[in-house]
C-alpha cells in the first residue's frame, strides 16, 4: 500500500461511453499526477496538479478531462475514447521535501476501450 | 531535461549482485538521479535518489562518478521477486514539483532466474 488508491481497478467502455477514473491520496501531498502507460511503452505524463491548480497539460486530447476538487482527490473524466486509449492509467502524488523526487503511485486502472 | 540511456534488458540469477548502468551525458548542475522499480500492472515504486558519489539504503546502492554523466544502480543478492522494470530518471525536483516533467524512458527489464 502506497497511500494512493485508484478506482476502478479495471474498466471496459465503449467509444461512446462517458466514465470517470478516481484517485485519492492519504499522504497529505500537494501535487498529483495522471500518467498513461500503454503496452510495452514508457509512462507518459498527462496532467500535473499543484495545490489543486493544473500546472501541466502534456498535449493530451480533449477527450480526457482532469478535475482536482481538493489536494487529496483527482479525477480523469473520459468521453468518446478511441481503442488506442486502452492502457494502464496511473495516478501519483508527491510532496516537495528538500529536493526529493519521490512520487507515490497508485495501483492503476486498466482501461479497455471497445 | 537530460535524456537517459539504459540497457533494454538484463538477466541474472538468484543471489547475484546486479548492476544497471544509466548514461545521462547532458545532466544539468541542479539535476538529481532517481531510480524507480515497476512490476507488471502496478505503479512504479521509488528505489533511491542521489546527486553525487554514493548513496545506500536498505534495498539498493547508487554510484555516481565525479562527472555525473552516468550512474549505476546496484542490487545486492537479487531474488526472484526483484524481476521488474527499472527506470533511471534525471531532473531537478524543484522544477518538477512546480510543474516540471518527470520523464520515464524505456527502462531496463531485469529477469532473475532460479
Image (cartoon, helix red, strand yellow):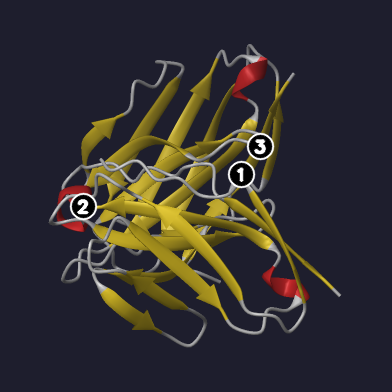
State the image coordinates of residue B38 (x, y, percent, origin top left).
59, 58
Question: Mark 2 = which residue?
Answer: B97
- Which numbered mark, 3 or 1, is in the foreground of this view? 3
Q: How busy is the neighbourhood of tag 2: few (under 14 within 10 Å), some, or many (20 plus)?
A: many
Quadrant of the image containing the N terminus of chain B:
top left
Residue nearest the viewer, comparing B37 with A35? B37
**Quadrant of the rendered structure where residue B80 is?**
bottom right
State the image coordinates of residue B64 (x, y, percent, origin top left).
32, 69
State the image coordinates of residue A8 (x, y, percent, origin top left).
63, 46
- Determine the chain carrying the residue at label 1: A
Question: Mark 3 = which residue?
Answer: A40
**Quadrant of the rendered structure where residue A71 is?**
bottom left
Question: Mark 1 = which residue?
Answer: A109
- Are discs 3 and 1 located on one and the same chain? yes
Q: Is residue A75 above or below residue B44?
A: above
Q: Residue at x 61, y 44 (%)?
A: A109
Amino acid at each position: 500500500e502506497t497511500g494512493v488508491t485508484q478506482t476502478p481497478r479495471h474498466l471496459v467502455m465503449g467509444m461512446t461511453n462517458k466514465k470517470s477514473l478516481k484517485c485519492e491520496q492519504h499522504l497529505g501531498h500537494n501535487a498529483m499526477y495522471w500518467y498513461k502507460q500503454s503496452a510495452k511503452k514508457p509512462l507518459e505524463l498527462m496532467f500535473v496538479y499543484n495545490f489543486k491548480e493544473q500546472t501541466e497539460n502534456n498535449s493530451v486530447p480533449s477527450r480526457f478531462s482532469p478535475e482536482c476538487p481538493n489536494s487529496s482527490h483527482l479525477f480523469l473524466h473520459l468521453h468518446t475514447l478511441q481503442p488506442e486509449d486502452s492502457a494502464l492509467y496511473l495516478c501519483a502524488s508527491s510532496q516537495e521535501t528538500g529536493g526529493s523526487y519521490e512520487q507515490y503511485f497508485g495501483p492503476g486502472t486498466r482501461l479497455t476501450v471497445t | 531535461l537530460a535524456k537517459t540511456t539504459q540497457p533494454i534488458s538484463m538477466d541474472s540469477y538468484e543471489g547475484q549482485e546486479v548492476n544497471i548502468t544509466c548514461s545521462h551525458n547532458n545532466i544539468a548542475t541542479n539535476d538529481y538521479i532517481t531510480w524507480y522499480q515497476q512490476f507488471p500492472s502496478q505503479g512504479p515504486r521509488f528505489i533511491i535518489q542521489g546527486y553525487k558519489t554514493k548513496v545506500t539504503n536498505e534495498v539498493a546502492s547508487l554510484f555516481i562518478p565525479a562527472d555525473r554523466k552516468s550512474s549505476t544502480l546496484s542490487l545486492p543478492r537479487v531474488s526472484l521477486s526483484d524481476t521488474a522494470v527499472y527506470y533511471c530518471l534525471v531532473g531537478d525536483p524543484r522544477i518538477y514539483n512546480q510543474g516540471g516533467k518527470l520523464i520515464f524512458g524505456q527502462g531496463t527489464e531485469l529477469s532473475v532466474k532460479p
